[in-house]
Every structure is written in structure tokens, then in C-alpha cells.
Amino acid sequence: MDRPGEDGALAGLLDAALAETRGGGGEPWPQSPALARLSGYVAARGGALRLIDFSPLKASRPDFWPAANTEIHEFIAAVAARDLRHGDRFVRLDDATYLLVMAQASEMGIHHVATKVAEGVTRELVGRHVLLDFASVHSMSGDAEGESLFRLVSQEEETLDEFLLRVRTLTRINREWRFPREARIDDEDAPDTDIEFIFRPLLALRDRTMSTFLFMPLRPMGDGYISGYAVLDDPGDPSETCRLDVMTLRHAIGAIDDIMEKGARTLIGLQVHALTLGHSGTRNAYRKALASLTSDQISRIVFELAGVPDDVETAELEAVAAALRPTAGLVNVQARLGTGNFQSFRAAGFRAVGIDVYSSGAAEAEVMQGIDDFIEGARRHQLKTYILGVRSVSLYTAAVTAGFDYMSGHALSEAFSAPTEVVAYRLDQPFTHYSTRSKN
């Protein structure tokens, strides 16, 4: 089940992987060096692989399996004909395992196809919308030396309590904890891991007001730091992005309550990854976490959808955005500089579109060349604009001149307009700790 036009090297690697995993004496797929080489080749060219394993269904329904096996193959053939593009492959490794090869696909795009197959098969054959009882989806990575890694990426049957228990293994939730003035590597009051949370103020450039603070995870890295989803070991795994999104949400509740107690008119911006909302299991876990918030707490949150690929379909983007509604009021979207998705962003009902030039790693000259086109595209579709991670005076001047509506500042440890003590994390001097005190 494939589309014409694949390159010869890919075809050769795929044939070798199939020969190694099929037939007598073949390696089972978790130990297949040829499959690892195929994965490394595809990943290096911007593609991805997924393994869909129906062996739980085979083991639980042995009498039903022969008929089910035929129906599974027919279902996958229909999906391949409808959803696969030029050069993609959907092949059977053994009677219960299928390999999906997408030559050019984002993690979100391939995961959408793989889970649609796994969920669709179990729903059609078993009549229940339960994935892990009967099928599992695995991400794959490998290299030319045959080193491979297979990760289960579907978490459909995990309850909210089980999910939050895993969250608490990452970090202890303690709303009273505050960043000290100095580096706190050995501080016994620090979280259990090196993940911290900071506030990045968002300034409205037209009237110079500051009403929103983006709440973000941060982790030390060498002499600097990494932030957002870069703190994860595998940012392409929906279970990982969801765990971080839920953890960030629960830490933000303490900040929101503090703001409300002080009577401040401040909003908190929270990122949610498209992978978290694009898969039913992680989407349900995040929505259950949202359901624990009060309406007053929700009213203080501005959500930002992150990790949206350039090749996302409008209907898929609308479905992902709809997962936050009606719970969420304001939803923005973070895009890549040079994106052409403004019409889709508008159709999905986003309020504003922004870019993070610090996390993108783009050179300053590249950013300056692209921001005018970004502003023009957003205005054409009546979208507000914001830019995050401005790290120099020249880039600040260029952003103001281009006409962004909002711009972020350096990250702070508290979200109040006049704190008595604050730790600042400057973008031009990453992870520099210093204290500023109010003169009042």
C-alpha cells in the first residue's frame, strides 16, 4: 500500500527491513537493525515512522482474529488510499503489526494518521473507543549503526489520577515555593527536578501596558537555559507534551490564585501543545485537568497553541482548537516565521498569532527579513500579532517598526507589576540571577 515516487534508497532500506522482520528466522521488529537504519534515514529527511501493533487484539480474541485480520488489512488499505501522499508506505511487518512510513511529515501529522487507524480499527471491530486494550502505537528512532528506540506513544487507558501521579514524579507541586535570589541547585525547598517555572511579561506596544504574563517551564542547560517544550527528552511524544502541559497548568493555578487575592488585573498565558490536543487520550487528560479549575481561574488564562506544523490541514487545526472550547475563552497560536497558515488560523477562531524568535534559534538577520511578511499576512486575515524572545535592541526596534501588537520582555520569577524582590532571566545573558528591589 504505497504511493509512487519514493526514492531508491528508501525503497531498498524498506525491502531490507521487511526481509529481516518477515519469514522464518527473521528478527522481531523491536530488535531489527534494518528497521533502525530505515528509521534513521527517514528522520534525516524530515519524515517519521510509526508502528501499529494489533497483537493485544490477537491475543485477547484468538477465535475472532482470522476474520479481524482481513478486516484490518482492508481498513488500512482504505486509509492508505485516502490519506497517504506521494512516497509514503503502509506495510505489514507480520500478521499483527503494520509499519507506517511517511517520507515528509510532522510528528503531529503522522501521529494523526497512525492513531486514526488504531482507533478506527478497534472501534469498527470491537465496538469500543478503547485503544490500549486492543492496539498500541509506537514511535521509532534509529541510526545507520542499527541502534533503535521504540516508544509507546498512546496512553488512552490512563486515568486522570494515574496521569497526575506521573506528573508528580517529575516535580513536587508547591504553590508557596518561590525562586530565591541566588542559584538554587542544592536548595532543599526546590522542586524535585531541575524544571523551574518563570513568567515572561507581554507588553502591548501601542499603549505600553503590561497585562499578560506567559507562564513557562525552564531548565538550566550549561551556562544558559532551555525553555518551553525543549525541556522534554522527547518533544515529539504526545504523552510527554501532555505531562508537561498538565504540570504547567497545575503550577499556574497557584500564581493565578495569588493574583486574584491581590486584586491585580493580570492574565496568565499558558502554552498547550498541538500533540497534546491532537490525540484523544492526552486530550481527555488535559481537559480533565482543566475541569478542576474554577470559572474565575479559567477567566484569567490566555491559551497559546504551540507546535503547529506548517502542513496541518485546516479541518485538523479547527478540531485541535475546538478541544479547548468552550472551557477556554481566549486562544492564540504560535507559528513559525514564514508560515502561510494565516487563513487556517483565522478559520479556526484564533485571536492572535505569534512567533518565538528565541526558541526558534533563527539568526537575527533572518528574523528581520521575515517579520514584515509575517505582519502583512496576519493583518490580511485580521489577526493580532505578538513576538516572543526579543533579545537585542536592534531586534526590538525592528519589531516595533514592523508593527507587532505585543512583545515579550525578559523572564521574571513573579507576575506582579511592583514586586519587592524578583529574579530576572535575561535573554541576552541567559540564566543570569540578579535581584532588583523596589524603592518604595
Image: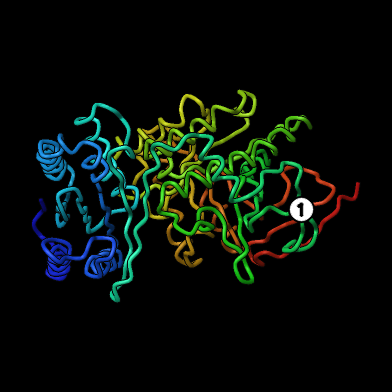
Task: Judge left or right: residue 164 versus residue 371.
Answer: right
Place residue 88 in its image quadrant.
bottom left
Q: Nearer the viewer, residue 170 or 292?
A: 170
Count of numbered badges drawn on the protein: 1
> How many residues crowd around disc 1 within 10 Å: few (fewer than 14), some, or many (20 or more)?
few
Please determine whether, in this image, residue 188 is positioned above or below residue 341. Answer: below
| Residue labelled with disc 1 | 189
Indicate the position of residue 253 as horizontal and vertical percent values.
65, 36
Amino acid type indicated by mark 1: Asp
Task: Judge left or right: residue 271 versus residue 237.
Answer: right
Indicate the position of residue 146 as horizontal and vertical percent values.
29, 72
Q: Which of 373 and 364 is in front in this view?
A: 364
Kindly identify the residue that appears in the image at 15 percent across and 38 percent down. 65
Q: What SS does tag 1 mark?
A: loop
Residue extending farthest bottom: 145
Indicate the position of residue 129 as horizontal and vertical percent values.
31, 30
Place residue 47 in its image quadrant.
bottom left
Kindly identify the residue that appears in the image at 24 percent across and 26 percent down. 127
Kindly identify the residue that appears in the image at 58 percent across and 28 percent down. 292
Task: Judge left or right: residue 214 versus residue 136.
Answer: right
Indicate the position of residue 257 as horizontal and vertical percent values.
71, 33
